[in-house]
Amino acid sequence: MSSSTPRYDLWAQETRANPVPVYARMRQEAPLVRLVDPYYKIPVWVATRYKDAVELMRDSRFTKDVRKLPDSSPSKQMRSGSFDAISQHMLSADPPDHTRLRTLVSKAFTPRRVEELRSRVTAIAHRLLDAVQPSGSMDLLDAFAFPLPVTVIAEMLGVPQEDQEQFREWTNIVINPPTDGNMKPIEAAGMQFVQYFQGLMARRRSEPRDDLLSALLTAEEQGDRLSPIELISMLFLLLVAGHETTVNLIGNGVWALLQHPEQLERLRANPALIDSAVEEMLRYRGPVETTTQRWAPQDLEFRGQVIPAGETVVASLLAADHDPEQFAEPERFDITREPNRHIAFGFGIHFCLGAPLARLEGTIAINLLLKRMPRLRLAEDPARLRWRDGILVNGLQRLPVAF
């Protein structure tokens, strides 16, 4: 990065609290810029304009498969051992492997199959709110936004309820960047995850059940070429993506409503607006800030700049969804916004497979929360709320509310 390039510190804590103004400057001044990730100490190219983000996500010249990079690439050197054992899933693959892996799990996330979960999601949400209602306050993330989707995806996979909290711990370690550059906790969590699922897979092979894990094992046995390491990686991806997206959709969505009381009252008065409200929550402060990594397998030109072989490039979904060339008054939170062609769930062949499930969980959870807790309000000064580190996941660390 040349000395004349403005510095955009996306990782600073004050930026984490509100990255939107920094992204606005980047769109104007350096819409594709090379930064250095302070946690992993590697260069990262960040695209911030909507049209560039869409183009990047459909550009097949870039690879999602780290194995295609030069051996000298820092990203390739980082992917080793137990971390590699949970990384060989469809988000880290190009066609035809991506097509094969996605096909194996796509049947579980069709709109029809997801709709069949409506009554179960509603029952879980009611149970969680029953548990906290007498207290008059809660951390919305801990008590509601996390246990709802993790229970749903764990039940789909066949993970026993008593093990679900353990997955939250492993997930937090693996997807949050190491503040001191130490990768050992990530590798240890990855190894524990691998060992856990190896044991669960052995039990399911001898005693199959009507769950997604048993179905994936059956698919493997029927010759669909799902290797053991691919299976472990797929389970990791489904568990992480299956709850992280919805946790932050609910958390960020409720936060946005509480910051905009006129929109909150509008939704209370007309719960039928929930579908468009959730779409605006996804656009305004979506649960995923940037795409997962893509790499240039050789020197590639994109938007007039040469991205060297082995270097990382990501699209900022949050920046794209605030691009005034795509959205009128993008900083305005409007639960009836139309049209609203946001890309919070990505774009192209890697579009989030679980988007229908996240939408279902979000609409049920938020409408039920507002119905059962008519006096819902923040229990802490909004300025004191802390957002999570890193630029991949966009979510609060906690969200104290009273009702």
Image (cartoon, helix red, strand yellow):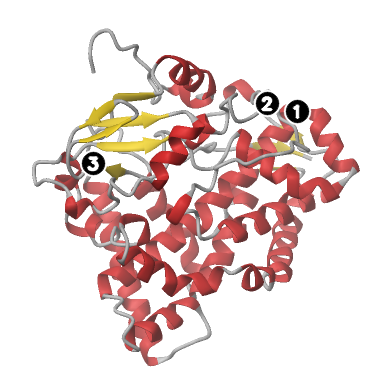
Return the residue nearer the eye: 251 or 165. Answer: 251
Neighbour tally class for label 3: few under 14, some 14-19, many 20 plus, Cα within 10 Å: many
Rounded to the nearest whole Å, what is the CA distance between mark 3 and mark 2?
33 Å
**Helix, strand or loop status at disc 3:** loop
Which disc number belongs to residue 260?
1
**Up-down: is 23 above or below 394?**
above
Q: Amino acid at mark 3?
A: Ala
**Residue 48 sits in which quadrant?**
top left
Which disc number belongs to residue 296?
3
Rounded to the nearest whole Å, what is the CA distance between mark 2 and mark 1?
18 Å
Left or right: 170 in relation to 182: right
- Mark 2 highlights which residue? 328
Neighbour tally class for label 1: few under 14, some 14-19, many 20 plus, Cα within 10 Å: some
Q: Nearer the viewer, mark 2 or mark 1?
A: 2
Return the residue nearer the eye: 394 or 105. Answer: 105
Q: Percent from the top left, x then y, of residue 384?
A: 58, 23
Q: Amino acid at mark 2?
A: Ala
**Helix, strand or loop status at disc 2:** loop
Judged from this view, the residue extending furthest toward the left is: 72
The answer to whether residue 161 shows anywhere in this view is: no
**Up-down: is 285 above or below 382?**
below
Which disc number belongs to residue 338?
none
Neighbour tally class for label 2: few under 14, some 14-19, many 20 plus, Cα within 10 Å: some
Q: Percent from the top left, x then y, of residue 248?
A: 57, 44
Query: Of marks 2 and 1, which one's residue comes earlier in the chain?
Result: 1
**Up-down: is 253 above or below 379?**
below
**Up-down: is 136 above or below 260?**
below
Return the residue nearer the eye: 342 or 252. Answer: 342
Count of numbered marks: 3
**Residue 183 sits in which quadrant?**
top left
Q: Percent from the top left, x then y, of residue 334?
A: 75, 32
